[in-house]
Image (cartoon, rainbow, N blue to C red):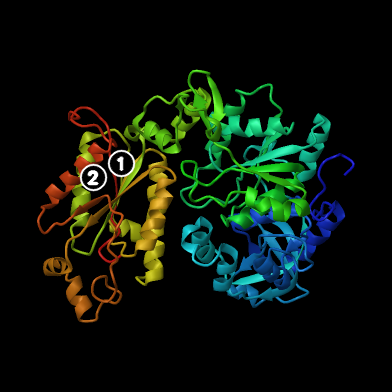
Amino acid sequence: MSDGLIPFHGGSLVKLLAGEERIRELTSASRDWPSWSLTSRQISDLELLLNGALSPLNGFMERRDHESVCHSMRLANGLLWPVPITLDIPEQLARKLSAGMDLALRDPEGVLIAALHVSEVWRPDSDAELKLFYGAGQQGDRIGVSRFPGDHYPYYVGGRVEGLRLPIRHDFRTLRFTPAELREFFSRQGWRNILALQTHHVLHKTDLEGVLRTARERNAPLLVHPSVGFSYPGADNHYTRIRCYQALLQDYPGEPIQLALAPLCRRTSGLREILWHAIVRKNFGCRYVVVQPDSEDTGERGAPEPQHLLGEFQAETGIEVLPFRRTVYAHEQKHYLFEDENPPGNTVLRFTQTDLHHRLEQGKKIPNWFTPPGVIQELSRTFPPRLRRGFTLFLTGLSGAGKSTIANILDAAFRERGGRPVTVLDGDIVRKHLSSELGFSREHRDLNIRRIGFVASEITKNGGITICAPIAPYDSVRREVRSMVEAVGSFILVYIATPLHVCEGRDRKGLYAKARSGQIEHFTGISDPYEAPLDAQVVLDTTVLTPEEAAAEIIAYVEKEGYISRGISPGRTLLEGTLIDSGSIC
């Protein structure tokens, strides 16, 4: 390379953005093409293709490259490439496409981003792909796997891509660089052997001090390069993370550090993931990469230690993957040490993510040696103490268990205490305005619960309190809702464990009788199963508790956990509730 930086993977930058005249041709021709509205995950992959970060790829993989990568972590031509870059589409679109056709790739607003010149359409063996990609026996431990089957369509379409424009990004525009732009910046600064930190967590001083020391030992400027592509439910929102990065770096004004964003959708695939991050950062001009582990407390869920990859792949890639070394704070010396070099008898201080979350929830002081005040301020804005944080009470149980009655008592109690805006959504309103077109099949029930979860998460995100009272018989969708809500606030699952025979004996609406006679299909407890939750924080049985007593138990739990204050006088406003009762058979 003339700029003195590490060469692109495969030798050169692959430019996929068309010129102005070609853009006009493609725009005109695309009116007659079939179109596909890209998902957020697919937009992230397409952006990396178009800006050259996935060089030498010139489009979405064909079958031979895809299968070769899954089996051997190499393209069909033998070049090292660990992660499949594929475009998945539904069957109805796949049946309209064939080799030689063109597909318009659009963003969710319909803007034409790129043209895909179709070379192949096929249906992969998804089960085999998962086993090859994530490893046999490990699928359930990977975040990416839980996203993979449900969020991927069954067919793949491969072919060369021509880009008209990069996807439109309205956030943090000054921190978004293409590989060519970032390499040009490095050259202007006179930087050469760049060390990239790949992170998807908030960084603190105890993180950055160790990475900076690693960089100084190699005389390497530091690129803080967080992934801000598609996120799985429950992940930190990237707005908070980036504001925290900016606040942290203000404490290091004299250091050669650059912050830039990588529109990268993580796969959480262990060894493959580390290699992929290394190759992507190589294309951005970096010679070293440090990958922050998934778990900052134990490291148990992270990928294998990167030094195990060096012997086999370092010579081939030209990029060195370095370990993420944790640091502790030496109290007497007032400086940071790597954990493995602390001398005996030395007093050191440690502070974990669990400690941080606990203190944020309780509104307690966080030490400045762990993270600077600016980061604490940003985290406190996004994750306020429980007393000021929105939360969702999610009541689940059989029809007739008492959920709606308890929810109404809770709603009245919260309104009586006052403080937050009150929105009441009863079952008829939910079905009329959110789910009027849905029936009661498992697919439709799950979709209805996801919609309720979305509403609950929006209210929770804005500091409100939501009370949901659906049957929600399936564990998987309840967990989805929990993840959705916990990304923005707190979630409390309440299982109203009233037995079936008691619920059927009440049968105030005659629904069980109709279900027994076959007049109602897909009725939970009769013709459809109910999966009792194992992760409920509160379990109640209205066989032995009145609805008022059950509501009092829930309020006591909420008070004990610090979500509301104890002993609030009637005249003092503290909280109000939102009721979502999705009906007897939702």
The residue shown at (34%, 57%) is: 430
Q: Is residue 28 left or right of residue 369?
A: right
Q: Is residue 543 visible?
A: yes
> Callout 2, which amino acid?
Asp
In this rendering, position of residue 238 left or right of residue 466: right
Secondary element type, mark 2 = helix
Between 440 and 50, the residue placed more toward the observer is 50
Indicate which disc, 1 or 2, sits on the residue closer to the N terminus.
2
Are the residues tagged 1 and 2 within 8 Å (C-beta)?
yes
x 52%, y 67%: residue: 136
Q: Residues within 10 Å of mark 1 (few under 14, many from 20)?
A: some
Give the image location of residue 316, x and y in percent.
Answer: 77, 54
Determine which residue is flagged by label 2. 411
The answer to whether residue 433 shows anywhere in this view is: no
Q: State left or right for residue 530 relative to residue 183.
A: left
The residue at 46%/48% (across/down) is 234
- Image quarter (top left, top right, bottom left or bottom right) of the C terminus: bottom left
> Quarter of the image holding residue 58?
bottom right
Q: For numbered disc 1, what is the local secondary structure?
A: loop
At label 2, counting other C-alpha atoms closer than 10 Å, the crowd grade (few under 14, some 14-19, many 20 or more) is many
Residue 403 % position (x, y): 21, 56
Most extreme residue toward the bottom is 517
Identify the residue under disc 1: 422
Say if 167 sits above or below 509 in the image: above
Say which amino acid is labelled 1.
Val
Kindly give the residue lying farthest to the right in the view shown: 2
Residue 436, horizontal then vertical, whole percent: 38, 64
The residues tagged by marks 1 and 2 sit, at their Cα atoms, a distance apart of 9 Å
Q: Residue 197, which numbered label?
A: none
